[in-house]
C-alpha cells in the first residue's frame, strides 16, 4: 500500500526531507454525487475527491557536524476555485535534524494526527473517517498547527516519539490565541504497527480546553492491510466524544486495488469548539461505510471510484459517490 502524500508531508515534518529543493504537488478533481442528509441531491465537479490538491517546496542543506537544515512550504491549491489559496496552509516550517532527532518551528503536522495514519483507507477524502469527521462533537482533527515548536526522536529500535507545543496557536484578529500541546508515538514490530496520540487545545474564542487521545494498530496479512483505531475527547464541561474506525486495503488483479472502511462517532456535545460551525444536536451518533476501487495507472496517476453511506441518529441519512483522477508530481 502506497503511503499517502499527506503522510509523506508528516514524515518530512519529522526530518525525512530529501536533498533539495524539491518541488512537488498533487492535482485531484472528481465528479461527485450526493443525496439525502436534509439537502437537495446534486451532482457537481469538485476538488479533493481522494486527496487534497497541493503545491509545495521542501529540502535540506548540510550544516556540518552531522547536522542538516530542513524546510517545507506547502499550500492547498483548489482546482475548481483556483483563486481560493491560503499560502502555507498545509505546512510552513524551518528546522534542523541530526543524531539527536529533529526540531522544526512553524506550521507543522500535529503528533495526534501522525498517530492516526495507520488507516488502510489512507485517511484521505474518501475514507470512512473523513466522511464524518468534524460534523458533530467537540473535537476537531485540525491536523496542522501554527506557531508550533515540534520535536521528533530518531528511530529507537522501532519506536518514534514526537511532541509539539504552540503557545500562540491559530490566533486571528477575531479569535484569541489558543494553547496547544501534543504527544504521539509509533512503534513498528515486523508486520505490526502500533500508535498512540494525545493533545490538549485551549481555544481562545471560547476559553474551552479540549483534550483528546487515540490508540491504533495496523497489521499486514500478506498483501492485505487491516487497521483499527479508537478516539476519545472531553472539554471539561460534561461534553464528550468517542469514536472508532476499522479499515482494510487489498490488491486486486493488475494495477487495481480495493479499500473498505467503517467509522462511528458519538457525542453528547452541542458544538465543535475548534471550528466556527455550531451543531444543532445535543447528542448524536454518526456512522459511515465506504468502498473504493483504485487503479494506479502509473506511479503518479491514480483513477478512483468510491461510494459511501452516512447514518445520523439525529438527522437524515445520506449517500454519495465520487469518480475522479489524482496526479502527483
Image (cartoon, rainbow, N blue to C red):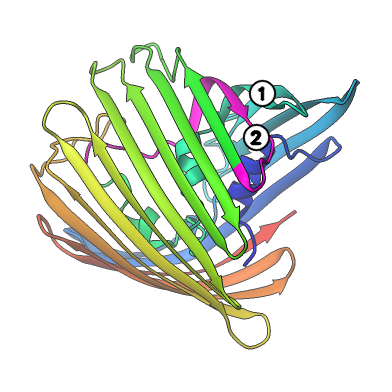
Could you say which disc has been placed on residue 118 in the image?
A: none
In the rendered image, residue 309 lying in the magenta stretch gets the answer: no
Q: Residue furthest front?
A: 157
Residue at horizontal 32%, vertical 47%? 231
Residue at horizontal 47%, vertical 55%? 123
- Residue 202 placement (x, y as % from top left): 32, 20
Q: Pick whichever, 248 or 98, lies toward us.
A: 98
Magenta span covers which residues?
136-159
Q: Pick whichever, 46 or 169, lies toward us.
A: 169
Cα distance, mark 2 to mark 1? Answer: 9 Å
Residue that carries the numbered disc 1 in the rendered image: 103
Q: Secondary structure at mark 1?
A: strand
Q: Pick whichever, 193 or 302, lies toward us.
A: 193
Residue that carries the numbered disc 2 in the rendered image: 13
- Residue 163 placement (x, y as % from top left): 53, 28
Residue 136 visible within the image: no
Residue at horizontal 14%, vertical 35%? 239
Indicate the quadrant where residue 261 lies.
bottom left
- Residue 107 placement (x, y as % from top left): 57, 26
Against 238, is 119 above or below? below
Q: Earlier in the sequence, mark 2 or mark 1?
A: 2
Amino acid at each position: 500500500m502506497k503511503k499517502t502524500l499527506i503522510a509523506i508531508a508528516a514524515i518530512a515534518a519529522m526530518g525525512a526531507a530529501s536533498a533539495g529543493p524539491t518541488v512537488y504537488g498533487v492535482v485531484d478533481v472528481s465528479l461527485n454525487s450526493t443525496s439525502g442528509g436534509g439537502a437537495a441531491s446534486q451532482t457537481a465537479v469538485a476538488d479533493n475527491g481522494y486527496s487534497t490538491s497541493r503545491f509545495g517546496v521542501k529540502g535540506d542543506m548540510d550544516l556540518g557536524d552531522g547536522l542538516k537544515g530542513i524546510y517545507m512550504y506547502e499550500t492547498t491549491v483548489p482546482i475548481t476555485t483556483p483563486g481560493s489559496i491560503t499560502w502555507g496552509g498545509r505546512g510552513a516550517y524551518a528546522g534542523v535534524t541530526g543524531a539527536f532527532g529533529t526540531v522544526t518551528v512553524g506550521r507543522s503536522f500535529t503528533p495526534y494526527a501522525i498517530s492516526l495514519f495507520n488507516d488502510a483507507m489512507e485517511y484521505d477524502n474518501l475514507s470512512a473517517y473523513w466522511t464524518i469527521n468534524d460534523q458533530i462533537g467537540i473535537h476537531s482533527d485540525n491536523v496542522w498547527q501554527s506557531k508550533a515548536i515540534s520535536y521528533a526522536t530518531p528511530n529507537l529500535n522501532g519506536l518514534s516519539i514526537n511532541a509539539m507545543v504552540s503557545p500562540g496557536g491559530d490566533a486571528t484578529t477575531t479569535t484569541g490565541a489558543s494553547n496547544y500541546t501534543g504527544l504521539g508515538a509509533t512503534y513498528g514490530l515486523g508486520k505490526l504497527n502500533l500508535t498512540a496520540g494525545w493533545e490538549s487545545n485551549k481555544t481562545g474564542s471560547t476559553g474551552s480546553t479540549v483534550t483528546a487521545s487515540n490508540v491504533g494498530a495496523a497489521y499486514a496479512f500478506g498483501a492485505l492491510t487491516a487497521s483499527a483505531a479508537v478516539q476519545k475527547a472531553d472539554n471539561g464541561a460534561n461534553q464528550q466524544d468517542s469514536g472508532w474506525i476499522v479499515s482494510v486495503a487489498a490488491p486486486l488483479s493488475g494495477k487495481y486495488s480495493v479499500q473498505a472502511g467503517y467509522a462511528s462517532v458519538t457525542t453528547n456535545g452541542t458544538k465543535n469548539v475548534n471550528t466556527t460551525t455550531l451543531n444543532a444536536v445535543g447528542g448524536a451518533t454518526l456512522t459511515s461505510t465506504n468502498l473504493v476501487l483504485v487503479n494506479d495507472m502509473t506511479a503518479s496517476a491514480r483513477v478512483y471510484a468510491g461510494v459511501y453511506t452516512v447514518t445520523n441518529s439525529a438527522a437524515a441519512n445520506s449517500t454519495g459517490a465520487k469518480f475522479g483522477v489524482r496526479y502527483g508530481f
